[in-house]
Amino acid sequence: DAKTTQPTSMDCAEGRAANLPCNHSTISGNEYVYWYRQIHSQGPQYIIHGLKNNETNEMASLIITEDRKSSTLILPHATLRDTAVYYCIVRNGGIRTGANSKLTFGKGITLSVRP
Amino acid sequence: DTEVTQTPKHLVMGMTNKKSLKCEQHMGHRAMYWYKQKAKKPPELMFVYSYEKLSINESVPSRFSPECPNSSLLNLHLHALQPEDSALYLCASSQSGTLRCTFGSGTRLTVV
């Protein structure tokens, strides 16, 4: 599986967009990019995933560069409740992973949303 | 029902005790997972079950014994644990063939 690199931490002001970068320069053609977050003392929460097209859902947008070597998770209007550790994970297969599928978490990026 | 329920939420056990952690989901997910998370560290995968069969064991010590009695339940049996096994134990589930996982809130285990 491709490794990912994320900054250790970042902060943003409440109400502003939070742009969380992730580098995955060794990603291969059939690897998906997943984003999860973990709010303190809770289990991780799925946010979004994509292969090569940009994706948007009710929580966030995922922008993947054309060469797929990096991506950005965008929280359009950050709130205090978005303060969490955000994990970028690259995983083979995505939709058709079969029995031997697993999510491997890296260190993630700690996002602090300030009032 | 879109949740993964873990019980108990907190557990304190001695090194000679036997205890079990329980995980339940009713979303029809056929893949279920156990993760272990130490303080200020990312979750680490322990086991993966697919269609009630163990498909991945990440070289976990035998004092941790998983069990999947049916498609909705996942247990983790604990025996002769060490204090360093104290951690948050997370259960997750997903549709088979996807890594869009739903996680429980975890069981915080303390071994004394």
Image: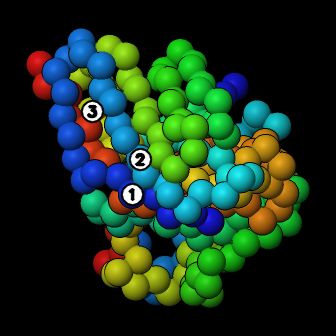
The quarter of the rendered structure image containing the C terminus of chain A is top left
- Pick whichever of labels 1 and 2 is earlier in the sequence: 1
Q: Chain of mark 2?
A: A
Spatial separation of the CA atoms under disc 1 and disc 2: 6 Å
Compared across the picture, whether B36 is left or right of B101 comes to left
Query: What amino acid type is highlighted by mark number 2?
Result: Cys
Whether residues under marks 2 and 3 lie with C-beta atoms below 8 angstroms apart, the answer is no
Residue at mark 1 shares a chain with residue at mark 2: yes
Query: What amino acid type is highlighted by mark number 3?
Result: Thr
Q: Which residue is mark 2?
A: A22
Residue that sits furthest to the front in the current view:
A67
Residue that appears at 40% across and 85% down:
B82
Spatial separation of the CA atoms under disc 3 and disc 1: 20 Å
Compared across the picture, whether B71 is left or right of A21 comes to right
Question: Label 3 crowding class (10 Å Cα cut-off): few <14, some 14-19, many 20+?
Answer: some
Q: Which mark is residue A83?
A: 3
Percent of width and height locating residue B52: 85, 60
The quarter of the rendered structure image containing the N terminus of chain A is bottom right
Q: Which residue is mark 1?
A: A5
